[in-house]
Amino acid sequence: MDDKDILNEGSGNQEKIELKWWEKKQGISLYQKKNQSKVEKQKKEKRELKRQLAEQAKAEKDALAKKPEKKTSLDGKQKQKRKPLVVRPIDALYNIDSVPKDAQEIIADFMNVVAATHPLNSRQRALLPKHIRILSHYLTDERSDRWLGYMNETTSLSAYVHYYLWWNLVRLTRLFSNLPKDFLNLSEQDVCLDIGSGPLTVPIALFLSRPELRQVKLTWYCMDISSQALQFGNDIFLSVAARLKCEPWEIVRVKGEFGDRIKESAAFVTCANMFNEANDNADMPPEYTAKKFAEKLLSYTDKSDSSTRFLIIEPGVPKSGRFISLLRDAFIRKDFLPLSPCTHCSECPMNGEDKSKGGKWCNYVFTTEDAPKTLLKLSDQSNLTKERAVLSFVALARAGEAKGEVEKKEEFLSFRIASDPIRLPGNRTGYYACSREGLLLVVTEKALHSGESYSVRMPKYPMRTDWKSGAYILNLD
């Protein structure tokens, strides 16, 4: 075959593709032209699908406009359109009003709380923004060069406590204050374990967030490879308890790493910002790693204890969101139920896996406008301006005790908002949300916020699908 290299595409479609003489001159191969033809065909099909959807929407709108409206039997006034769905708010993850006032005051004055036990001299205070910036590089873009015991180095630990611990307390107190009350219903003499505790971030945040637990005698095993960080955190915890005029919980410092044993079985196991570091050093696929980590976490508990609970919190980045979703699946297979942020125990629709639909991952955001002014100023001085705080997490409890807290009634649909507002055609606003039906695109004129959950009566009509994300479209108005 000389000038006309011809390729028949498909058995049913005898469309011929041939190279022009100038294409041959340019060195274009028949294979390249075939691929280009496929791409153009896919683009054409996509445009045609969008056109059909637009025509369908217009036809539905025209049909509604032409439909004669019935009149009332009393005054002849026209009836209004179909009533919008009744939306019942359930909870919000970041309601600032739920944070106790005394906790807010301590967080606002946290620099002085730290200074009460570990004061900085004038030179150390002047160099603090620089040390924070250096530590930030180690924790983010220079992860491969970070040494595991960076919190054993005095300068790094001081920078971490004055900045990262402070921001973590802002995030976690907002979260802990809004978690379901029953989930944190701990009893006298309960044993708790915080893995990768560092400067006791989780125990301090929980002590600040839940006044009802301050009088409960708990024993906390705080595990970390840095004994210096544990001592630093213990001093701050005692200082916080003194300011609140409460007896502190018993703290047992354990120098060790994830997997090391403790003397007692824990009823409540927590870890924050630990697995993102562990995953950096893992060579196995994340599915395998999540399964093994779930087994390790369960080994710290008594399998016969029906009140066992886990709380795992990670940074709100795609990799961490994906891992949290896999860890959730592993625990469900071990007869646990996710109580928050999930409104269901079905397959996670925001697992960060499906890249073709944006690879959406589960994470929740709030703005930092209510954060302490001193902390915001320190962030600016360190060139780490922070306008939003974000995290991914899952709270789990044994299914035997928590069955009543998971939605069972099929006639109602619960969902949690998991995105910023999305501009839609026709001056509409949408929000991605998680539900048992899968990913939702919630369309409404009302302002919704990340982390808020709602319940509506299950629509009787089949929900349309968003062509871009594959989400079911739920119109609330």
Image (spheres, rainbow, N blue to C red):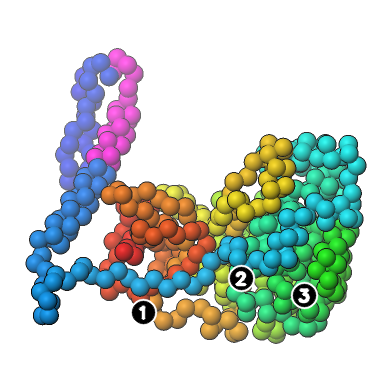
Q: Nearer the viewer, residue 4 or 392?
A: 392
What's the residue type where badge 3 is placed?
Answer: Arg
Badge 3 crowding class, 10 Å Cα cut-off, few under 14, some 14 to 19, many 20 or more, is some
Task: Check whether the beta carbons of the residues at disc 2 and disc 3 lie within 8 A of each other.
Answer: no
Span colored in magenta = 24-44
Badge 1 crowding class, 10 Å Cα cut-off, few under 14, some 14 to 19, many 20 or more, is few
Residue 227 visible in the current orientation = no
* Quadrant of residue 370 within the rendered picture: bottom right
Relative image position of residue 51 (x, y in whole percent): 21, 46
Relative image position of residue 342 (x, y in whole percent): 52, 68
Residue 246 visible in the current orientation = yes
The residue labelled by disc 3 is 214
What's the residue type where badge 1 is placed?
Answer: Glu
Relative image position of residue 378 (x, y in whole percent): 73, 42
* Comes first in the chain, label 2 or label 3: 2
The residue labelled by disc 2 is 179
* Quadrant of residue 25 within the rendered picture: top left
The residue labelled by disc 1 is 411
* Comes first in the chain, label 2 or label 1: 2
| Quarter occupied by the C terminus | bottom left
C-alpha separation, residue under disc 2 versus residue under disc 3: 16 Å
Residue positioned 73% across, 55% down in the render? 108
Residue positioned 37% across, 48% down in the render? 423
